[in-house]
């Protein structure tokens, strides 16, 4: 899913709310690529939960729609409540239609 979802210039966030145990440490794994049909060449995406943030980039140089070059990324956070909202959003400047792409999200407790 391309993370730069636009409706009349509005940038949207997608999120999932999940039950978590306070103090538990969780790993969020996901596949990241970018829409190679427009600028910028380096796409940027953030993931956040429980007031914690991770930022990831992906360079689309040499990529195509049929060969996007998906890469697995991971990020950890510590739950602070019984449920956490995990959000992904584009941090690309300009709000264009060619943002980072996201797939195969999973969440596992590691501590």
Image (cartoon, rainbow, N blue to C red):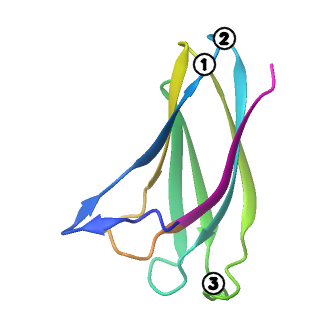
Using the image, determine if residue 32 lies above or below residue 46: below
In the image: residue 109, left or right of residue 14: right
**Residue at the left extreme, as displayed:** 8
In the image: residue 91, left or right of residue 68: left
Label 1 neighbour load within 10 Å: few <14, some 14-19, many 20+: many
Mark nearer the N terminus (2 vs 3): 2
Mark 2 touches mark 1? (CB < 8 Å): yes
Whether the magenta-drawn stretch holds residue 27 is answered as: no
Q: Residue at the location (55% across, 71% down)?
A: 42
**Gap between marks 1 and 3 measured at Cα:** 36 Å
Mark 2 touches mark 3? (CB < 8 Å): no
Per the picture, the main secondary structure of the magenta-coloured stretch is: strand
Q: Residue at the location (60% across, 86% down)?
A: 65
Q: Which residue is mark 3?
A: 61
Q: Which residue is mark 1?
A: 79
Residue 67, quarter of the rendered image: bottom right
Boundaries of the magenta span: 101-111
- Tag of residue 23: 2
- Tag of residue 104: none
Q: Assign the C terminus to one quadrant of the image.
A: top right
Using the image, determine if residue 21 lies above or below residue 18: above
**Gap between marks 2 and 1 measured at Cα:** 5 Å
In the image: residue 29, left or right of residue 43: right
Using the image, determine if residue 56 lies above or below residue 35: above
Label 3 neighbour load within 10 Å: few <14, some 14-19, many 20+: few
Mark nearer the N terminus (1 vs 3): 3
Using the image, determine if residue 11 lies above or below residue 84: below
Residue 24 percent across, percent down from the top left: 70, 16
């Amino acid at each position: 899913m391309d993370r730069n979802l636009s409706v009349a210039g509005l940038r949207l966030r997608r999120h999932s709310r999940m039950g978590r145990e306070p103090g538990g440490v969780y790993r969020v794994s996901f596949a990241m690529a970018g829409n190679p049909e427009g600028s910028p060449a380096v796409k940027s995406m953030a993931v956040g939960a429980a007031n914690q943030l991770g930022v990831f980039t992906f360079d689309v140089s040499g990529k195509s729609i049929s060969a996007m070059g998906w890469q697995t990324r991971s990020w950890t956070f510590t739950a602070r409540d019984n449920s956490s909202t995990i959000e992904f959003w584009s941090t690309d400047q300009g709000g264009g239609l060619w943002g980072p792409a996201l797939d195969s999200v999973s969440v596992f407790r590691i501590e």
